[in-house]
Amino acid sequence: MALKQDQVEANRKLAFKLVWIIVGALLFAFALVPLYDVICSVTGLNGKTKNTAETATKAVVDLKREVTVQFVSSVMPGLGWNFYPKQSSVVVHPGQVTTVMFEAKNITNEEVVGQAIPSVTPGKASAHLKKIECFCFVRQSLKPGEVKALPLRFFVSAELPKDVQEMTLSYSFFPASQQ
């Protein structure tokens, strides 16, 4: 009888541990996306950049250096948009605030909402691209046939490694809900 009682108690402890493992795994899964975003924005992994407008006023322009910033765009299947930069590249001095324009057109017969996801290459340059104003900060909604000019204001920090003379900023537009 005591052996059976010990077995029941051991099973109860095991079940309790398994429940805690499941609860912990669920909590970790819910925290993973925000945690990933924080890690990427801090480290520049996956081309994510920090969105800091206040550093633009403190930026010192380095007139001795030039960096070419290229722009690439893509639209994921199901969005029904044309999306492209108005200029394929710009040459900037680190610290110099620059504005470039992108254009999006809804080519469907219904209102469509999209969200732009940026990526910067090379990876070591992503932490040095500072966006002040960007269409990627919010979802974009376009009515049927509507064309919208989408501004991007940014600067490249003077701390950009000297061996980086060219960087590419890529935007991919994904379908998004209207919430």
Image (cartoon, rainbow, N blue to C red):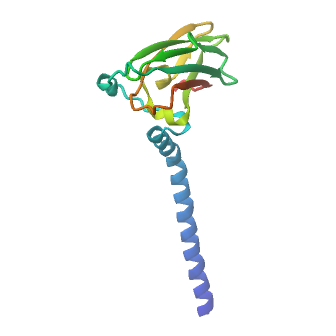
Q: Residue furthest front?
A: 64
Residue at screen point 56% across, 25% down: 168
Mark count: 0
Residue 86 vs residue 35: left or right? Answer: right
Residue at screen point 64% across, 15% down: 81
Q: Residue furthest bottom?
A: 1
Q: Is residue 16 above or below residue 81?
A: below
Give the x, y percent position of residue 1: 61, 93
Q: Residue furthest left?
A: 58
Quarter where residue 143 is shown? top right
Quarter where residue 57 is shown? top left
Q: Is residue 15 above or below residue 161?
A: below
Residue at screen point 46% across, 31% down: 162
Give the x, y percent position of residue 14: 58, 74
Residue at screen point 41% across, 23% down: 94
Give the x, y percent position of residue 165: 51, 26
Give the x, y percent position of residue 27: 51, 53
Front residue of this view, candidates 151 and 130:
130
Quarter where residue 55 is shown? top left
Q: Is residue 2 above or below residue 120?
A: below
Q: Residue furthest right?
A: 77
